[in-house]
Amino acid sequence: MHIVFITPASALRRFPVYRLGSRFYGHPNAITGPLILGGILKKAGHTVEVYEELNGKLPLKNCLKKADVFSIYTMTSTAPRAYELADIIHANSDAKVILGGIHASALPDEAAHHADQVIVGEGESVILDVVEGRITDKIIRTAPPTNLDALPLPDYSILKTPCDCANIMTTRGCTYRCTFCTTSRMFAPYRQRSVDSVIDEIRTYKKMGFRYMNFEDDNFTADKERAKEICRRMIEENLIFKETFFFGRTDMADDEELMTLLEKAHLNRVLIGIESLNEKALEQIHKGQHREDIVRAAESCRKHKIRLIASIVLGLDADAREDIRKAVRFAKDLDAYQLQPAILTPYPGTPVYQQFDAENRMIVPDWEQYDMMNVTFRPANMSSWELQEEFYHAVTHFYTFHSAFRIGKIFGWGYAMRRLGLAFFSKAGAFGARFAAEHAKNTFYYKLKHNIYEENQAKNTSAVYHLLRQTTQNQVAEASWNDISSILTTESTRLK
């Protein structure tokens, strides 16, 4: 059979200018899941192709002519595109459509409306049986693999879109459970691969000629002794890349030996979640760190020539506008190499989602906007548009043309050029969104600024209230959820 794996991208991220801007932030790479699953199918004798829409155009017409099965990965912001592709495939071919990934795993019943089958969780144990028809359930719930060493490595030979950076996951899951995090729930429990297995994979990528590598673990330094051993082996075998990225936590700075090994192994780019400087906010999200931990980590990164990407969360209930601006200034004062301002996003399956849903604070019904760049809920201490403006304030005040020269002096002039590019695209993006908010009535930004989402939510809530008042308790008890859902969906569409 001919199988096509697709990792979709939203309309904005398929736009050529956005793709160009993303090159300044990092190097084109591919998520490992489809490459692992595709490798399993290729080994079984099937023909497999993998496409990342973020990095290149999907030749859908050609794929429709030859594919027997499409497997589409979903994240919340890409779910509408995944559903669109699934519907197009069903309308134009007899190919089977399988949906999987974080969003489909959180909301499998929703995904099932567009798919022949939905895989919930990690799919290595079932993918071959699903594709070859031995498992026919509509929704397949999987058990997480316990022996990660037994899984095959990602197969980059089946990837058809640009990629110059290898991704590697040495663990799955996370030892922490931040309230807004999806991956720590999708990949629970926390599991590790052996150091030998990790080194084998790194050795493979070195032989393939990759110059860049990402450790995609939620927290590469969670087990410090294990991280040290991986670094030692990389140094001993000269498995050094021009740039290696990893996710870390502030507590890595407590171990000087670890920091030295990270430097020698050229793990020279780290994202650390600062999230907020407000201690109450950090407690609310169960972050488990304090301001002094962040300062110590930043100083240690600077000492060991590790470029810090500072991640902050915008819109935590305990934070006001000035708390956000303090965090941005703080990141700038730390000489953070990059800033990742992430708007708090209530992803399905997380405690934040459950809280906001219970409090009737989720105002945007379009999953495509759930990308950590757009406000989708009613904040506690400001309006939705005010929080959106704080996102633009953060990127435009951090990425300035002047700051590029300072970054050049610290990290080298190649990185100064990258900062200049980020400054240009940040300012252009903020200008475009603000212009749309004033003049483009059908856009997300116009609706957010002019409170149209909140007005619609209020109308929908009122419609539901009146519907339930008009329906006796016996009728509600006898009606199926599908009947009620159909009525509410129709009413919601009319009110919009």
Image: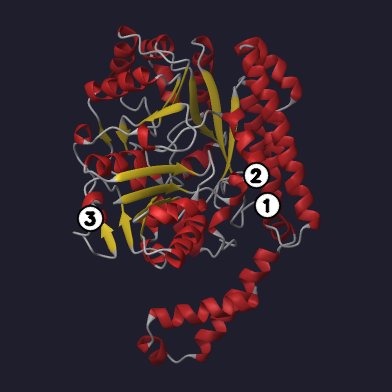
Q: Nearer the viewer, mark 3 or mark 1?
A: 3
Q: Which numbered disc, 2 or 1, marks the residue that appears first in the sequence? A: 2
Amino acid type of the residue that numbered disc 3 sits on in the rendered structure: Glu
Report the side of 267 relative to 439 (left or right).
Answer: left
Q: Splitting the image into 4 quarters, where does residue 261 fall?
A: top left
Q: Could you tell me how far apart the alpha carbons at marks 3 and 1 are, in whole angstroms? A: 52 Å
Q: Classify the position of the C terminus by image quarter.
A: bottom right
**10 Å crowding of disc 1: few (<14), some (14-19), many (20+):** some
Tag shown at residue 132: 3
Q: Nearer the viewer, mark 3 or mark 2?
A: 3
Identity of the residue drawn at 21% across and 31% down? 149
Amino acid type of the residue that numbered disc 2 sits on in the rendered structure: Ala
Q: Which numbered disc, 3 or 1, marks the residue that appears first in the sequence? A: 3
User: Percent from the top left, x then y, of residue 114?
Assistant: 42, 65
Q: Are marks 2 and 1 in contact (CB under 8 Å)?
A: yes
Residue for badge 1: 382
Q: Could you tell me how far apart the alpha carbons at marks 2 and 1 are, in whole angstroms? A: 7 Å
Tell me if residue 423 comes above or below residue 186 in the rendering.
Answer: above
- Residue 260 visible in the snapshot: yes
Tell me if residue 103 comes above or below residue 19 in the rendering.
Answer: below
Tag shown at residue 320: 2
User: Percent from the top left, x then y, of residue 121?
Assistant: 30, 51
Identity of the residue drawn at 56% across and 55% down? 368
- Residue 187 visible in the snapshot: no
Tell me if residue 422 comes above or below residue 469 in the rendering.
Answer: above
Amino acid type of the residue that numbered disc 1 sits on in the rendered structure: Met
